[in-house]
């Protein structure tokens, strides 16, 4: 049996309905499935995301504005349903956040059959 | 049904009466891929930003750029900082053009979910890994949905496209010109449609 494209797109929509924010953290350690979220999340970085849906895909767009969480060096990112669940955790080379710029993050989520 | 007939039927079924019917359940799995993350810095330039310590006053010349702060977007610059993939596997499903380089001549996501290449056409990615550690080995895996992978020439560059090296589909290759800006290139000698490209790096 196989999920039809319309079924996968329904799963995509159900998922995106439970994503409201994303946030950044300062810990760059390795990711493992047993973790429950960012290892050192910066609370001030939690912000609403915009999600662009296309066939079997959600693209999550997040911006950390220049007036908040200034002075931190961020190394991890998570897409979340705030207060409920953190869906994922991705780490990257540390990016310092200053009042002179925003940090803009884009991540795609793809839904498919095995 | 007479009682002796029903007993006969039960005997023929050959099972005790207390065994219920077991309904076989088929499970179905859907996979959610958490794909590549792109992290950019976007300078605020001379844009007015409410509550900002330097750009929060319209018209002054004391903004972070030293230029007059104006309403709306002004002198902003987007700079790529990092591109990282979970488990260092970049997956391209050709749903959009985000990782398409302008030198591509093939049909990259013109039809959603496809990279279409005719003979002589190429597809070139932009950075698919950037500042995610030094790339010293790669495995490029291309899955045609039409045509043959034998009609494709595959290359990767770990230094932003300065030096390209040939790779074999699905085979790990040691990168001689290491770097932190990984891209790939696919050239076709006959028509091929590709549904998915995986690039594993480390």
Image: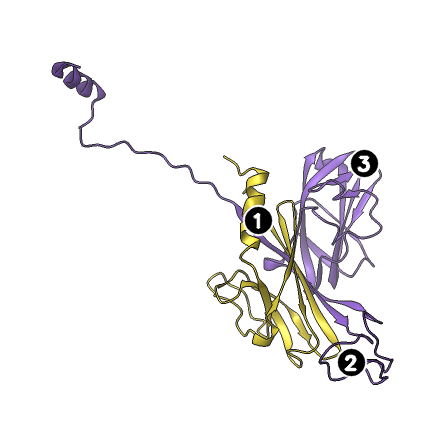
Chain colours: A yellow, B purple
Percent position of residue A79, x then y:
57, 62
List the residue tagged with mark 1. Answer: A12
Q: Residue A97 is drawn in which quadrant?
A: bottom right
Could you say whether the residue bearing mark 2 is in a helix, strand or loop? loop
Whether residue A18 can be seen here: yes
Disc 1/disc 2 C-alpha distance (Å): 39 Å
Whether labels 3 and 1 belong to a single chain: the reply is no
Disc 3/disc 1 C-alpha distance (Å): 32 Å
Write the residue at 57% across / 54% down. Answer: A16
Q: Is residue B55 above or below residue B12?
A: below
Residue closest to the eye, A114 or B30: B30
Quarter of the image with the C terminus of chain A is top right
Q: Is residue B122 above or below residue B181?
A: above
Looking at the image, residue B26 sits to the left or right of residue B167; the answer is: left
Percent position of residue B11, x then y:
17, 20
Q: Which subunit holds the residue at mark 1? A: A
Label 1 close to label 2 by CB (< 8 Å): no
Count residues near mark 2 (Cα–Cα under 10 Å), then give few for <14, some for 14-19, many for 20+. Answer: many
Looking at the image, residue A81 sits to the left or right of residue B42; the answer is: left
List the residue tagged with mark 3. Answer: B118
Count residues near mark 1 (Cα–Cα under 10 Å), then give few for <14, some for 14-19, many for 20+. Answer: many
**Mark 3 / mark 2, whichever is N-terminal:** 2
Q: Residue B9 is drawn in which quadrant?
A: top left
- Give the foreground label among 3 and 2: 2
Residue closest to the eye, B99 or B76: B76
List the residue tagged with mark 2. Answer: B55
């Amino acid at each position: 049996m196989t999920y039809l494209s319309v079924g996968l797109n329904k799963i995509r929509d159900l998922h995106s309905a439970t994503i409201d924010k994303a946030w950044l953290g300062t810990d760059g350690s390795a990711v493992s499935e047993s973790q429950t979220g960012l290892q050192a999340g910066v609370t001030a970085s939690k912000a609403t995301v915009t999600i662009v849906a296309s066939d079997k895909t959600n693209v999550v767009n997040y911006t950390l504005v220049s007036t908040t969480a200034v002075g931190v060096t961020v190394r991890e990112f998570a897409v979340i349903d705030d207060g409920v669940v953190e869906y994922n955790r991705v780490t990257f080379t540390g990016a310092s956040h200053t009042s002179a710029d925003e940090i803009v993050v884009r991540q795609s989520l793809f839904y498919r059959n095995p | 049904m007479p009682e002796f007939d029903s007993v006969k039927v039960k005997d023929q079924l050959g099972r005790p009466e207390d065994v219920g019917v077991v309904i076989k359940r088929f499970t179905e799995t859907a996979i959610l891929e958490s794909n590549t993350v792109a992290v950019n810095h976007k300078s605020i330039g001379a844009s007015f930003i409410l509550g900002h310590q330097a750009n929060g006053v319209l018209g002054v010349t004391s903004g972070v750029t030293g230029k007059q702060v104006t309403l709306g977007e002004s002198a902003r610059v987007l700079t790529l900082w990092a591109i990282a993939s979970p488990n260092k596997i970049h997956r391209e499903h050709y749903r959009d053009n985000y990782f398409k380089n302008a030198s591509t001549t093939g049909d990259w996501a013109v039809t959603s979910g496809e990279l279409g290449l005719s003979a002589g056409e190429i597809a070139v990615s932009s950075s698919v890994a950037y500042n995610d550690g030094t790339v010293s080995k790669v495995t490029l895996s291309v899955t045609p949905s039409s045509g043959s992978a034998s009609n494709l020439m595959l290359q990767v560059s770990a230094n932003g496209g300065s030096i390209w090296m040939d790779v074999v589909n699905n085979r790990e290759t040691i990168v001689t010109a290491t770097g932190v800006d990984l891209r790939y290139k696919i050239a076709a000698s006959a028509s091929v449609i590709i549904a998915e490209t995986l690039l594993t790096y480390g």
